[in-house]
Image (cartoon, coloured by chain):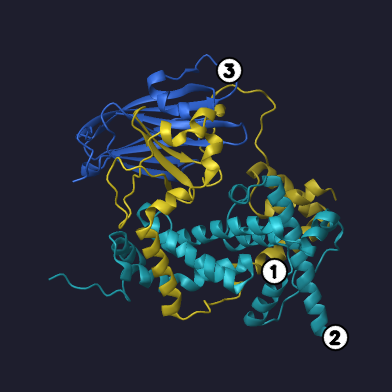
Chain colours: A cyan, B yellow, C blue
């Protein structure tokens, strides 16, 4: 009689092989193992718990349906992250058509404001503990428009190149570069601003 | 400083320039205080924005509750494959010849070439396969061809350089 | 047993495959003498796409022996790697700029082709890698 695999200790490639043969328990183990990472990426892009939950679950369903296409060139977690990123980009495009984001409008109207920003001390967050730093970065990210936050997340956290980001976002490489530049300068300004407030 | 120069500094920071341009920019940074200041700021921000400094968040639902919805959706999708064809995205219409687009299903035999664990279908069934985050596979028995179409929006590497093998007009140039 | 595969040309141990890179465009024929209109039989299936003209860019014949892997360069950025995958038939891996883009496995029915294709938004054209056993 075939021995039941130890799902909890099996590595990802083993679980993927089992899931590819239809083993939903193996797939559930993969979900359990990586759900926070996939959810976190969705949340970083959508900034809404319910949307991030829905889209991350949709990503898992798509992952199951396309599991046979997973060839192992990247890790399973990376492959799933790509799926959820694409779903989030679709969602953001749909939302953009109806959204009246005042930050978006301001970004569109001012255009070029990043050229005039004063240079910021490159270490505005020194001496902060890691937890505090993460909170501040997260709050600053929340103040960016969806386009600027997306390009920052894809470049800095997902380490995609300009060309790959341009294809995913459906824009030119030049637009990616401009948005990334603006986003970085705005982040520097926001993080420096928070630091100055702390000193009062 | 001009916008294009600012973006060049950033591209240098991101290793998105050629090695010869990288040398030029490094030299520029070394002799121009304004360029150095901006580069330092960009570099400082980039150093902060890495995976370690992302705020860890966790799924708000319990493990069982989160999985139960996924499981239900998987089972629902497997019970209702016909609905998948009805919701095929029309984007593929844009790449079809006008006659084919208006009568696509009549002219082309769409075949599911799935090897998914629970959605195995016999060859000859009629269904559009939408796999790999947007690629589409279809077989035309009449024309003797199975086509896998990968739109540029989902392919992360450039395969489309057919024209670089052909002498082209001098004004075609890749973006920076 | 999968129904409908009676006429499948199962890939034998030594297999000859022709790999052709085809360019789809609405432009009139470019002046490059190496370009020629694509074989009509080969591109019959592409008539469902919107492009008016299809040209052969590169043509490579390869013999796949046993379990050997054959990597063919069709253009500076486009390569395809072919291998017999035993009972699964032919395995074709498409590479763009050295990165794996797509993997296709299966049997090519007798007298048929595979076409792996995509669009090039920069030039409003399309590329196809056509594999013919």
State left or right for residue A38 relative to residue A151.
Answer: left
State left or right for residue C133 relative to residue A102.
Answer: left
Real-space Cα distance between discs 3 and 2?
69 Å
Q: Quadrant of the N terminus of chain A?
A: bottom left
Q: Circle 2 is placed at which residue position?
A: A200
Of pointers 2 and 1, the one earlier in the residue sequence: 1
State left or right for residue C48 relative to residue A3.
Answer: right
Outermost bottom residue: A200
Percent coordinates x, y for residue C82 in the rendering? 33, 37
Check whether the beta carbons of the residues at disc 2 and disc 1 lie within 8 A of each other: no
> What chain does mark 2 sit on?
A
Decide: few, some or many residues near mark 1? Use Cα within 10 Å; few <14, some 14-19, many ≥20. many
How many numbered marks are there? 3
What residue lies at 85% left-to-right and 85% top-to-bottom?
A: A200
Q: Dot 1 lies on which element?
A: helix
Q: Circle 3 is placed at which residue position?
A: C30
C76 up-or-down from A45: above or below: above
State left or right for residue B128 relative to residue A54.
Answer: left
Q: Dot 3 lies on which element?
A: loop
What residue lies at 43% left-to-right and 52% top-to-bottom?
A: B84
Q: Circle 1 is placed at which residue position?
A: A141
Real-space Cα distance between discs 2 and 1?
23 Å
Same chain for the residues under marks 2 and 1 in the image = yes
C69 up-or-down from C41: above or below: below
Decide: few, some or many residues near mark 2? Use Cα within 10 Å; few <14, some 14-19, many ≥20. few
> Is residue A75 something that shows in the picture?
no
């Amino acid at each position: 009689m075939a021995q039941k695999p130890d799902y909890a200790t099996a590595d990802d490639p083993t679980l993927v092989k089992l899931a590819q043969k239809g083993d939903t328990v193996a797939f559930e183990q993969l979900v359990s193992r990586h759900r926070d990472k996939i959810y976190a990426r969705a949340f970083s892009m959508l900034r809404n718990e319910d949307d991030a939950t829905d889209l991350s679950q949709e990503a898992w369903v798509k992952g199951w349906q396309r599991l046979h296409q997973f060839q192992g060139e990247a890790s399973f977690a990376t492959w799933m992250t790509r799926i959820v990123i694409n779903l989030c980009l679709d969602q953001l495009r749909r939302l953009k058509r109806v959204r009246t984001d005042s930050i978006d409008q301001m970004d569109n109207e001012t255009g070029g404001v990043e050229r005039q920003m004063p240079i910021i001390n490159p270490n505005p967050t020194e001496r902060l503990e890691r937890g505090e730093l993460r909170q501040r970065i997260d709050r600053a990210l929340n103040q960016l428009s969806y386009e600027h936050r997306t390009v920052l997340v894809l470049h800095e956290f997902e380490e995609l190149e300009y060309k790959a980001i341009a294809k995913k976002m459906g824009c030119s490489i030049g637009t990616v570069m401009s948005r990334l530049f603006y986003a970085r300068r705005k982040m520097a300004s926001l993080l420096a601003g928070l630091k100055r407030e702390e000193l009062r | 400083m001009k916008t294009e120069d600012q973006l060049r500094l950033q591209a240098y920071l991101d290793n998105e320039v050629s090695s010869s341009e990288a040398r030029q920019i490094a030299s520029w940074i070394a002799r121009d205080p304004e360029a150095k200041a901006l580069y330092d700021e960009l570099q400082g921000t980039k150093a902060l924005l890495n995976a370690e400094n992302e705020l860890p968040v966790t799924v708000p639902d319990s493990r069982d509750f989160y999985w139960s919805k996924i499981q239900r959706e998987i089972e629902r999708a497997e019970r209702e494959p016909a609905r998948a064809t009805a919701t095929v995205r029309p984007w593929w219409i844009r790449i079809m010849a006008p006659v084919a687009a208006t009568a696509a299903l009549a002219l082309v035999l769409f075949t599911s070439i799935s090897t998914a664990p629970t959605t195995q279908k016999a060859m000859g069934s009629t269904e559009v396969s939408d796999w790999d985050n947007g690629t589409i596979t279809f077989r035309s028995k009449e024309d003797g061809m199975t086509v896998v179409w990968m739109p540029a929006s989902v392919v992360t590497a450039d395969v489309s350089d057919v024209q670089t093998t052909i002498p082209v007009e001098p004004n075609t140039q890749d973006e920076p | 047993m999968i129904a409908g595969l009676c006429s499948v040309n199962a890939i034998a141990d030594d297999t000859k495959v022709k790999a052709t890179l085809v360019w789809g465009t609405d432009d009139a024929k470019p002046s490059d003498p190496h370009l020629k209109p694509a074989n009509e039989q080969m591109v019959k299936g592409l008539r469902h796409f919107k492009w008016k003209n299809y040209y052969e860019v590169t043509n490579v014949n390869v013999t796949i022996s046993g379990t050997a892997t054959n990597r063919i360069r069709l253009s500076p950025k486009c390569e395809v790697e072919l291998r017999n995958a035993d009972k699964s038939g032919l395995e074709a891996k498409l590479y763009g700029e050295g990165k794996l883009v797509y993997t296709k496995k299966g049997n090519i029915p007798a007298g048929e082709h595979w076409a792996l294709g995509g669009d090039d938004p920069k030039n409003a054209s399309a590329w196809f890698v056509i594999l013919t056993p």
